[in-house]
Image (cartoon, rainbow, N blue to C red):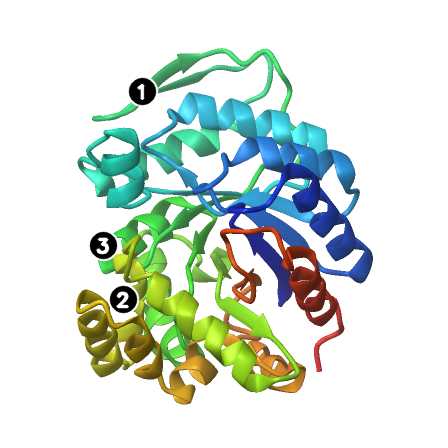
Amino acid sequence: MDVGLLLAGGGTTMSEMVEIAQEAENAGVDSVYIAEAWRSAFVPLAAIAAGTNRIRIGPHVVNAYGRSPWITGMSAIDLNELSGGRLHLCVGTGNKHINADWQGIEPERPLKKMEEYATLLKQIVQTRVGESVSWQGEIHGMEWPPAVEPQEEAIPVFLAAFYPKMLEVAARTADGISLGGLLSADYIRNSFRPRAEAAAAAAGRDPATLQYKMAPFASVDDDVEVARRATREAICHTFAPLSHPYLAYAMRESRFADVTDAVADHIADGEFDRACDAIPDRLLDELTICGTEAQCRDQLNAFDGLIDEVLLVNVNYSAATTEGLLPAFRQLIDFAGKPQI
């Protein structure tokens, strides 16, 4: 199992992100990804690619409603060339806030769109000069002769998928599946992976060819209560001011429906501290990477053999300020870069 970092980009300068990536590479971390939310996907990754030599890079995830398959594909080919073939491309539908509120785009027909998007994108990123992409679907279509040779090894295309029908789309069309956080190892082992593998087999593909990424919240501190408080606050912030319905659904699927309801109720009543207090230690132990280094090691190792690449989302700093940012990430890099036990 590879271990990387997922940078949200909020409150972080470009030079700081490059510095974090360089330190991560030097420490032996496997990858650094960028969330397309507070930053664009490809520009920070280009800076990181230019400043590093080994680590895998990628967006987690590119918003498919904000970019056509053509623009995404060309950007990926360029970035893969710049990085020397180190790109993994993760694509998703985004959510209501990113699409409707921020972009004024209604996310229509997401299942059909993502099936066509992934199918077309895989063709774009591996079509050689002298060949042509000729494809037509219900939503997307293309007649395009590329003028730039892609790298010899095809760029892996991952779809962000968790809800059952989108999971089936990803299992049919993509090289792998990108997951967020707040999922237990038991749920992935006993529910998610069996459904993904069944969908792949039903589509006539070998389930063993599917790869899996996930991005859990992570907070490492010698003081376990400091780590837990930071993680509780991060979870509560996914309910407001920017709601992430996916994460609430993930908590329910991992058998924490009562906690999900309590947090939602307290947040709705403006009682943030009570919402944090409603999150038990058991949830943090099962759904996050949180606590002392030894505790985090045990939590991380629970996903070994289930997930191919874990992207740690550092929550132990304020996204509103860069103060304390690099020290917090250095602690996470130090943890992530050490050999697994």
- Work out which quarter of the rendered image holds the N terminus and state it: bottom right
**Residue type at tag 1:** Gly
- Residue 209 placement (x, y as % from top left): 50, 56
Q: Earlier in the sequence, mark 1 or mark 3?
A: 1
- What's the CA distance linking mark 2 and mark 3? 18 Å
Residue 293 lies in quadrant: bottom right
- Residue 243 placement (x, y as % from top left): 27, 55
> Residue drawn at (73%, 56%), measured in percent from left and top?
24
Label 2 sits on a secondary structure element that is: helix
Q: Earlier in the sequence, mark 2 or mark 3?
A: 3
Mark 3 — residue? 165
> Residue drawn at (53%, 84%), measured in percent from left and top?
225
- Work out which quarter of the rendered image holds the C terminus and state it: bottom right
- Residue 25 placement (x, y as % from top left): 77, 53
Q: Nearer the viewer, mark 2 or mark 3?
A: 2
Contact check, label 1 and label 2, Cβ < 8 Å: no
Label 1 sits on a secondary structure element that is: strand
**Residue type at tag 2:** Ala
Mark 1 — residue? 141
Label 3 sits on a secondary structure element that is: helix
Mark 2 — residue? 248
Residue 209 is left or right of residue 94, and the answer is: right
